[in-house]
Amino acid sequence: MSIKKEFFFLLFFIFSFHPTVYSQKQLSLEGRRGVTVITHGFSPGGKISEEWINFAKAVRTRAGKGSIFINDAHTGLWKALDEQNTNQASDEIIFIYDWAWASDNLSSGYLEACADHLFAALLNPPKALQLNKPTALLEKPLHLIGHSRGAVLLSTLTHKIGWFFEGSPEISVAHFTLLDAHPAAPMGDCALPGILGLCPPPKVYKSQDIAMQLPHCVIRADNYYRQDGVYEDIITDKIVGPYDGIRVEGLGRFNCELNNQTLTYGSSTMGGAHASIATRWYYGTIDFDNLYKHPIINSWYVEDEKYPAMGPRETTGYFFSRLGGGQLPEPIPEPQKIAASPPKKILFNGDFSIERVLWKGKIPGWEENGAAGDAKLSPQQYEGEFAIRLERPKFNFLNKDIHMRQHSLGYFPLNLKGKPSRIELVYKVLNQPKGKNTLKISYILADSQTEVILQEINISETKTAFQTVSIKANPQILGKVGAIRMSLEGDNNNKIVDIKKIDIVQ
């Protein structure tokens, strides 16, 4: 790790915390129950704060009734938060997306990998809800609420929704609330879709130097942010890590800059106003009774001519939402939005090109969220490109699954822009010991954990040059959420296979 990255690791560790025409039905959402997705930002130590759990419970209380689900970071599946769920699809459905294990990783790619997984998870509704089709959640009024890097993750999610379901008027993001959205420069967030201007901005910068622009699938948004003038600060007025948020294009009066000085008063010394803006200031506009005793300062909500979004508490923040009782933000003018960016790879990091810690086997998109296997990156590079190495040693003293690697849960599209989807595989056999081996490519369906074998390649007679194979998608996996698995099967005979690329293509 470079000195610069070590510095930013310390900095973050100590910091807590194409156009589509939409129907009038989608533009009239006040009071309707739907889906709320809540996403936190950087979480030191890889653990989600209890305040975010309370945040979700407060939303359920405002809804009157509903269900809360949180993802299991290991399996990638949704699980009920508690026993108070009604499990009725007609009630509010609330999701907490826990990516704490990845949010504090300084390597780039982890935010994108988690956005890819969240997209898939929303297309794999919890069984308890008994929804009849994968897109059922996305067809409901959808409210995304994200803080800091979590808002950037949700922005990345909106591009996936907009690109995969372009031309589907029943699928949209009805409302996106951003809370001090902060693209983190050390983690490569500045290169993500929709980040405008200089990122990071210069040491002395103005609000207009950096911003975010949302894709066409987002109908409405409100943005609450504050700045102290230093984008990624170390310490300001004895407050550690008061990182700045950014504005969002096209929101008019709902692009709300809060009074940083006022919001800093009463905030924690860890993160300051940046940490307080979500689970404290915005939370205070959800839960007026403060049922879960969050540190909330009444002076935060005093009327302020320069910063009108500060208050009063009952008529700001969550007030402008489906369940908040107020008028929803105005729809974003179409010229103020951008086309959804296509994913770099349908199977995220299927060419293993994203930064990683080589000796630890850490590969964004290939760990947690339903991923499996211990196969690591090959120590050998091919013209600067990496590969995953599958091995069948005669003796496996550590009993590791180095013969297999499974991707995190993802979405296998029915087609790609009107053309059938298939898998493209590029692999090379490094040696030819005696015995029989096959390279098996399969798909593990998320809802049933059923393994669907897509192709078994006899590699005992394969040449040692890289081979490209096109694998037709089995109808069983089209439009389904699951995980692509690559495994070297057969004799334990020191067989070695390097896979340079696997992706879903036209």
Image: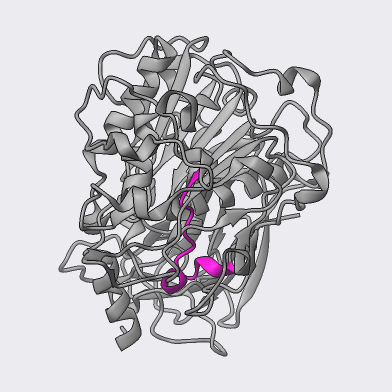
Nearest the viewer among 55 and 271 is: 271
Nearest the viewer among 466 and 116 is: 116
Picture quadrant of residue 392 = bottom left
Which range is magenta?
178-191
- Does 307 sit above or below residue 425? above
What's the residue at 44%, 55% (across, down)? 149
Instruction: Answer whether residue 181 is magenta in the image.
Output: yes
Nearest the viewer among 275 and 423 is: 275
Give the number of callouts.
0
Instruction: Answer whether residue 489 is magenta in the image.
Output: no
Q: Report whether residue 297 is seen.
A: yes
What's the residue at 48%, 37% (across, down)? 121
Residue 84 in picture, x, y percent from top left: 28, 13
- Does 165 sit above or below residue 235? above
- Does 160 sit above or below residue 67? below
Q: Report whether residue 2 is seen.
A: no
Nearest the viewer among 87 and 454 is: 87
Residue 346 in picture, x, y percent from top left: 63, 55
What's the residue at 53%, 48% (across, down)? 306
What's the residue at 61%, 16% (across, down)? 30
Left or right side of 34 for 270: left
Q: Residue furthest bottom?
A: 383
* Quarter the C terminus occupies: bottom right
Residue 14 in picture, x, y percent from top left: 21, 64
Q: Residue furthest left?
A: 397
